[in-house]
Amino acid sequence: MDNRWVVPHNLELLKKYQAHINVEYVNKSRLLKYLCKYVNKGPDQANVIFERIKKGQDAPINDQTRDIDEIKEYLDCRYICEQDALWRLLGYEIHYHWPPVERLPVHLPLMNLIKIKKEAKLRDVISDPKNQKTMLTEWFVANKEYNDAKDLTYCEFPLRWRWDESNKKWIKRCHGFKIGRLYYVHPTEGERFYLRMLLMIVKGATSYVDLRTYNGITYQTFKEACAARGLLNDDNEWYKTFQEATNWATASQLRNLFTTMLTYCDLKDETQFFEKNWTKMIDDIEKQLKLKYYPINYTPTEAELQDVLLQELEDIFCKNGQHIENYKLPRRSTQHVLDTTNRLIQEELNYDIKRLEEEANKLYLKLNKEQKEAFHTIIDSVINNKSQFYFITGHGGTGKTFLWNTIVSYLRAKKK
């Protein structure tokens, strides 16, 4: 038994029906949606048991386990009342949708979806010209061939034209209509998101180039075309946000904030935003480059700092499933070659050697007899490349961490 309403005396019902009862208390704003789903879930369900089992006949046996299969003793049925059964027998409509809706795909050039059957050959799929035809590409064709089609946007096109799926073409309607709805595109998809914005307002486009053209100027990207049409807000809000963050955030945190803004905040001019803020994201990078060439008094150039910054940003984009080339940012300099060695090893080697030597000496003088014995044994193994496994145990406060810090300081001072 399944009861979806508040029942005050649950124990009484359990005793009366000897069954599982699911009690739910609806106290959310989604109550109407829940009730609508509950009311329209279909006919009531009933369990039916065959009388032959009650008459002592053999119960169904599972051949694999040789056990009585209680599930097969019951039939899972749907109960339909007389009126509902008569309605269905007469063939009346059970439900209908109004108004009719046509879902319209949004895709970049040659990036449309294709359904491939299991037995289909890839060569035949590629050579079939129908696979390159979509509602969007044929909208371009219809605008070329028919002057009266140019008065409609892609979204409005199903009002007067219908899609012939078999022939992959738009045909002018004689009667009826449909409302066009473009598939949702997330802002993180970049150019496809801005293409969707243009398809909502541009009429009579005959190609992707027409969509990128405004007032006689053809822009390189759909985003630039959206900006020229005034579809994007200015970036003052994001400049102020980033400037406020520079008062408390580290350079690493600023780089993460920068990538987040590019991904989700629809910046109008990504290049200008980078040019004005890139110097605020390199404090730690500049320090690492100076330590890398220590004791030489090295001063990194702007090109080198920017290249390393762009590499850091590219890594963050990759971790979030994005690519830096999807955004209009500067490219790394071809003259400057980045150090491609392991970054973790670089960080372990970028220490002040003199300070570590002094620290290791001070720590070593404080070791007791057992700690010194362990220290020399482990250091000898490292220096002579003898692969060994060591386990140091003891109660809390007996100096295990102190010994380990002494060993690590010594090895780092030796650039190990």
Image: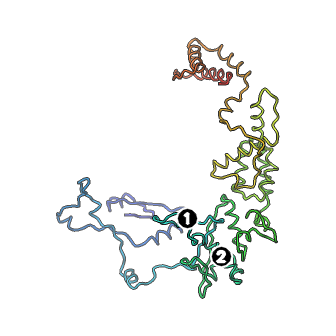
Disc nearest the viewer among 2 and 1: 2
The residue positioned 69% from the left and 66% from the top of the image is 195
Name the foreground residue: 396 vs 162.
162
Residue 120: x and y, percent?
48, 66
Q: How many marks?
A: 2
Q: Is residue 251 left or right of residue 406?
A: right
Q: Name the residue beneath numbered marker 2.
A: 139
Pick whichever of labels 2 and 1 is earlier in the sequence: 1
> For the residue marked with disc 2, what is the amino acid?
Trp
Q: Residue at x 39, y 80 (%)?
A: 84
Tell me the quarter of the image containing the N terminus: bottom left
Question: With respect to residue 290, does 170 lie above or below?
Answer: below
Mark 1 Cα shell of 10 Å, populated few (<14), some (14-19), many (≥20): few
Report the residue marked by disc 1: 30
- Residue 357 lies in quadrant: top right
Taking depth in this image into account, of 379 and 144 the one nearest to the observer is 144
Residue lying farthest top? 369
Residue 297, given in percent of the width and then of the height, sits at: 82, 29
- Secondary structure under the numbered disc 2 in the rendered image: helix
Q: Residues within 10 Å of mark 2 (few under 14, many from 20)?
A: many
